[in-house]
Image (spheres, rainbow, N blue to C red):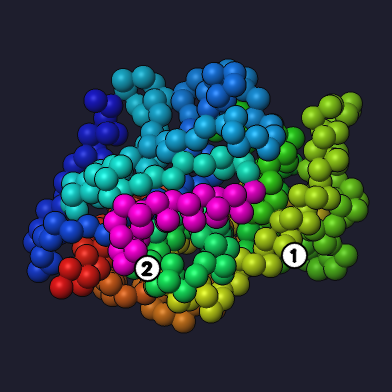
């Protein structure tokens, strides 16, 4: 067993022991859980070519084609709990720690009362909303129309839930006992634009990764753009003629497929340019639905898990044809350009419209009620494996389970 698996198992058992030492009864009736993974959280498989697109260590050492084409019947998606990095020595644990905690502390069983909704995370998040509706109806068929259930989602998938809840029936909304949102990017992130400028290489440039144009082919990447972006120049003056949803702005500021340094236009880059206006318009209409809270969404009890353990970008800097989009790029103008958050999301704006409790690491948490837990998870991706978060999740679910069992 890889060492980090052993550590995750020990931590899950510790949480289970803490739960046994509470006054919460160990009822056998679990509230079914639907889990929605975030970007890169599902394994993608090409049914036609019979090849794995994403989801194991080989994705780092071979060149895969990650360009998105709308072909849902061709692409299979499964939940990615982990994948080996150094086989038998070290695994990249994604949702495995969360799954262990739910199994060891609350007795959940994968495929019985715990359902992971794998999806093509490159696609428009409206498609995920449709998948969620289908899965909810399946759960209700299995458990009965009156059955309460829980939603758990990481990162961008929370936006799909918020979008879905606006059109869901009152009966559906009332059947959701609680929605746990890990790192919800309600107002987007400059990180998405940064990846469309330089690509994403999980193992560094020595390994293969996602090129800038492959990322720019994904509708989901545009839906993660900051919906209220602010640019400043190197003197700190606000640049007012920047509209992130206008294709002409992308040309003028050399963004995405129009970035500087491209010597020869590739066929892929040409396709990305052809689709740009459509992707931007789609992202704009999506953002209008999910960037702020609505009455329909607030009908569902919620707990959010967010981190302020990093310094991240709240305003980008534009100077001499270059856009500075990462914290390491902005050594000056720190107070104007940077703020606390995780390594993707600034805390500013995330809590807009939130009127319930806000607690931090070490503070008492109102389990069973609505609250935001601001914690010290090291990264955005680590929010779903950070043990204080998983402890809170387990205790909150146990509280709700007892409430609905009585």
Membership of 138 in magenta stretch:
yes
* Pointer 1 local density, CA inside 10 Å: few below 14, some 14–19, many at least 20: some
Position in image of residue 173 (x %, y %): 44, 70
Between the residue at mark 1 and the residue at mark 2, the CA separation in whole angstroms equals 39 Å
Q: Which label was assigned to residue 230?
A: 1
**Left or right of 179, for residue 333:** right
Task: Identify which residue is drawn at 64% across, 67% down.
Answer: 289
Q: Main secondary structure of the magenta part?
A: helix
Q: Secondary structure at mark 2?
A: loop
Residue closer to the observer: 322 or 197: 197
**Left or right of 321, for residue 41:** left
Asked whether the viewer can see residue 383, the reply is: no
**Left or right of 133, for residue 302:** left
Q: Looking at the image, is 90 positioned above or below residue 397? A: above
On the image, numbered disc 2 is attached to which residue? Answer: 175
Task: Identify which residue is drawn at 59% across, 49% down.
Answer: 127
Q: Secondary structure at mark 1?
A: loop
Q: Which residues are magenta?
A: 124-150
Position in image of residue 392 (x %, y %): 28, 62
Position in image of residue 233 (x %, y %): 82, 61
């Amino acid at each position: 067993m890889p060492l980090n698996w052993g550590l995750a198992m020990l931590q899950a058992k510790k949480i289970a022991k803490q739960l046994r030492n509470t006054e919460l009864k160990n009822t056998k009736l679990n509230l079914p859980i639907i889990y929605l993974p975030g970007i890169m959280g599902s394994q993608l498989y090409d049914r036609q070519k019979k090849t794995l697109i994403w989801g194991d260590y080989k994705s780092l050492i071979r060149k895969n084609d990650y360009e998105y084409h709308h072909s849902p019947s061709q692409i299979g998606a499964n939940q990615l709990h982990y994948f080996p990095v150094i086989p038998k020595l070290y695994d990249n644990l994604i949702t495995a720690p969360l799954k262990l905690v739910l199994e060891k502390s609350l007795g959940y069983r994968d495929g019985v009362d715990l359902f992971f909704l794998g999806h093509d995370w490159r696609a428009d998040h409206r498609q995920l909303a449709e998948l969620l509706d289908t899965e909810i109806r399946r759960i209700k068929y299995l458990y009965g129309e009156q059955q309460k259930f829980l939603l758990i989602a990481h990162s961008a998938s929370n936006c799909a839930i918020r979008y879905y809840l606006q059109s869901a029936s009152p009966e559906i909304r009332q059947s959701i006992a609680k929605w746990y949102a890990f790192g919800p990017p309600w107002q987007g992130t400059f990180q998405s634009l940064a990846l469309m400028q330089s690509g994403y290489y999980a193992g560094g440039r020595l390994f293969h990764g996602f090129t800038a144009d492959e990322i720019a082919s994904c509708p989901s990447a545009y839906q993660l753009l900051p919906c209220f972006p602010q640019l400043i120049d190197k003197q700190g003056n606000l640049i007012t003629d920047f509209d992130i949803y206008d294709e002409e702005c992308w040309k003028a500021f050399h963004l995405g497929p129009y970035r500087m340094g491209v010597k020869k236009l590739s066929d892929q880059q040409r396709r990305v340019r052809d689709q740009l206006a459509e992707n931007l318009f789609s992202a704009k209409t999506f953002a209008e639905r999910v960037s702020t809270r609505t009455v329909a969404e607030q009908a569902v009890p919620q707990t959010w898990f967010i981190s302020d353990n990093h310094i991240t970008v709240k305003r980008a800097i534009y100077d001499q044809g270059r856009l500075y989009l990462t914290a390491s790029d902005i050594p000056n103008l720190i107070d104007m350009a940077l703020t606390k958050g995780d390594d993707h999301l600034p805390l500013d704006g995330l809590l807009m419209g939130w009127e319930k409790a806000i607690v931090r690491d070490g503070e008492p948490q109102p389990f069973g009620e609505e609250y935001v837990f601001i914690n010290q998870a090291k990264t955005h991706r680590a929010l779903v494996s950070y043990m204080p978060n998983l402890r809170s999740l387990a205790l909150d679910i146990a509280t709700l389970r007892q409430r609905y069992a009585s």
